[in-house]
Image (cartoon, rainbow, N blue to C red):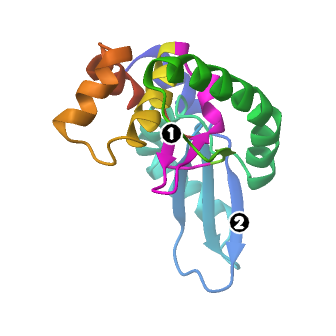
């Protein structure tokens, strides 16, 4: 057993919640390595500690696995991040749209910057382009790919071969960038 694991075996900080309707002790390990224990309301602390001692190796393993996973933001933190980066993202998107649209010459109605949880961008049939504010936080070549991708949907509202040929006019390495984009999370 490594020294790091042995050190962790000595002390595992945890948050304890007691519940009336709980019949057994439950242990959960969350992103960042936070350990939470839920136990019955009247169960003595000594029995909780004994249970944790029996599960110590499993808990330490989970903590080591989860300590590098980023914690999810609270709604308040997420809103603050959105407001902090929204206008930077808007300026970036508008500038890059103007740059790439010199080549394409396409018409769009409006541009919106949103806090989208599962998309980098979208295009409506009415010509509205929507972009995730997180474009301001990723490498420029990736945000350029997203912007060109959505811009090209104004002409080809699909993912046909014609669509990808259109994207490739300005982003010839789009396949590489598309793969890289999947590694960036929408936290």
Mark 2 crowdedness (10 Å alpha carbons): few <14, some 14-19, many ≥20:
few
Q: Position of residue 4 (x, y in %)?
A: 50, 18
Q: Residue at x 48, y 44 (%)?
A: 59
Q: Quadrant of the N terminus?
A: top left
What is the residue that sits farthest to the left in this orientation? 161
Tell whether position 131 is magenta: yes
Establish if 179 lies above or below 56.
above
Q: Quadrant of the C terminus?
A: top right
Establish if 45 lies above or below 160.
below
Where does label 1 land, which residue? 120
Instruction: Give the quarter of the image for residue 104.
Output: top left
> Which residues are the magenta region?
116-140
Residue 171 in view of the camera: no
Tell whether position 2 is magenta: no
In the structure shown, which secondary structural element does the residue marked by tag 1 occupy? loop
Of residue 116 and residue 38, the one placed in the foreground of this image is 116
In the picture, measured across the screen, residue 76 lies left or right of residue 107, that is right
In the picture, measured across the screen, residue 61 lies left or right of residue 133, that is left
Where does label 2 land, which residue? 17
Q: Position of residue 7 (x, y in %)?
A: 56, 23
Q: Residue at x 34, y 26 (%)?
A: 178
């Amino acid at each position: 057993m490594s020294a790091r694991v042995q050190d962790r075996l000595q002390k595992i900080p945890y948050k304890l919640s007691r519940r009336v309707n709980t019949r057994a002790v439950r242990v959960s390990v969350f992103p960042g390595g936070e350990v939470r224990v839920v136990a019955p309301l009247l169960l003595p602390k000594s029995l909780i500690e004994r249970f944790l001692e029996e599960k110590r190796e499993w808990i330490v393993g989970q903590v080591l696995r989860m300590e590098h996973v980023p914690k999810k933001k609270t709604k308040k933190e997420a809103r603050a991040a959105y407001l902090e980066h929204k206008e930077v993202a808007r300026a970036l998107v508008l500038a890059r749209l103007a740059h790439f649209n010199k080549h394409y010459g396409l018409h769009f109605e409006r541009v919106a910057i949103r806090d989208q949880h599962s998309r980098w961008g979208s295009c409506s049939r009415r010509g509205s382009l929507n972009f995730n504010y997180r474009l301001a936080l990723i490498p420029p070549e990736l945000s350029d790919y997203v912007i060109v991708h959505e811009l090209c949907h104004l002409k080809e509202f699909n993912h046909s071969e014609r669509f990808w040929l259109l994207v490739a006019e300005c982003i010839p390495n789009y396949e590489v960038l598309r793969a890289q984009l999947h590694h960036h999370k929408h936290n």
